[in-house]
Image (cartoon, grey):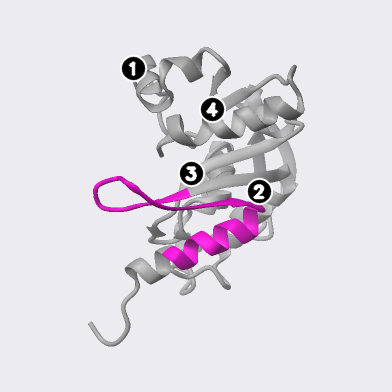
Amino acid sequence: VPSRWILPPILEERRRGSPDIQLTVLIASGCHRDMTQAELEQKFGLELLEQVSIVQHHGGDSSCLVDMGTLPSGGPLLVNQVAAQAELLISEGFIEPHFFAGFSGGRKSVLPGVAGRNTIFYNHSAGMIDDPRARAGILEGNPIHRDMQAAAERVGLAYLCNVVLNEDKQVVAAVAGDPVLAHQAGCEIVREMTQVSGQP
């Protein structure tokens, strides 16, 4: 995700509306390792890093998680407290076909991005992935997408900016605004770029 290009205008707009705003970037790493300092500098740029606080999400650390109830599937919703307590939660990301969530981007910044390990494991379980609607390009009726969307709504994801990249990692489209509507618009762009009809 080209954060060094996406985040500055978003943060500038926030500051225009609230000059004293405290800005925290929560790295939505799911169950993955922390980013190194070099990776952070490459992703965000030094100038941006000097303007915000960086928090790396640790999905296995219960001390940084908040219990936000149960998801439609029955799985637990454990979320990073920074996201749960934010006055305004904004996400960035990119959209591409995803083999069991339908598409990446959008709600995936919350689940799995800043969710607890048990929540992620439940969402990514064999039983959920085995559902015939848990396939690339399918959102409607997809139980994995449904839980991800419910998690984003429960936490209060208010705004997103997602991009579409080509094979050279260049931005070829961008969507922003309402987390559900903007993501749907981005998925349609990706669908037109990647989906084929007829028999293989």
The answer to whether residue 36 is left or right of residue 13 is left
Residue that numbered label 1 is attached to: 38
Residue 52 located left or right of residue 97:
right
For the point 43% across and 61% down, the residue is 100
Q: Considering the image in quadrants, where does the N terminus appear?
A: top left
Q: Amino acid at mark 1?
A: Ala
Tag 1 or tag 4, which sits nearer the N-term? 1
Q: Nearer the viewer, mark 2 or mark 3?
A: 3
> Which label sits in the foreground, 4 or 3?
3
Q: Which image quadrant for residue 53?
A: top right
Marks 2 and 3 sit apart, C-alpha to C-alpha, by 14 Å
Q: Are marks 2 and 3 in contact (CB under 8 Å)?
A: no
Label 4 environment density (alpha carbons within 10 Å; few <14, some 14–19, many ≥20): many
Residue at 73%, 35% (x, y): give it. 88
From the viewer's perspective, tell me whether residue 99 is left or right of residue 12. Answer: left
Q: Which residue is mark 3?
A: 93
Along the polypeptide, which appears first: circle 2 or circle 3?
Answer: 3
Q: Amino acid at mark 3?
A: Gly
Q: Earlier in the sequence, mark 1 or mark 3?
A: 1
Mark closer to the chain start, 2 or 4 = 4
Image height check: is 173 above or below 16? below
Residue annotated with mark 4 = 57
**Element type at marker 3?**
strand
